[in-house]
Amino acid sequence: MNAGRKADSKIQQLKGKAKEAAGRLTGDRRLAAEGRADHAEGKFRQAGHTIMDVFRKR
């Protein structure tokens, strides 16, 4: 996986964790849910890029 895609995925995950924490801290359930969704999206992106890289190396 190139560094740019890896960084984008990690940033998405961190953004999600921050949103989730802010939502929990303030009691905003919607913000916490958005944070969980952003975090999951980042993890799925990273997994997808890893799979693509495995097949590209063959």
Image: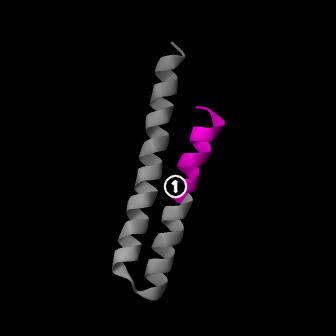
| Looking at the image, residue 34 lies above or below residue 50 | below
Q: Is residue 4 magenta?
A: yes
Q: What element carries label 1?
A: helix
Residue 57 in percent (x, y) is at 54, 16
Q: Identify the magenta region.
A: 1-13
Q: Is residue 9 left or right of residue 30?
A: right
Residue drawn at x 46%, y 19% as measured from the top left: 55
Q: Is residue 34 left or right of residue 17?
A: left
Residue 24 in percent (x, y) is at 44, 81
At label 1, the amino acid type is Gln
Q: Residue furthest bottom?
A: 26
The residue to which callout 1 is attached is 12
Residue 14 in percent (x, y) is at 56, 60
Q: In which quarter of the image is the N terminus?
A: top right
| Looking at the image, residue 25 lies above or below residue 2 | below
Residue drawn at x 41%, y 54% as measured from the top left: 40
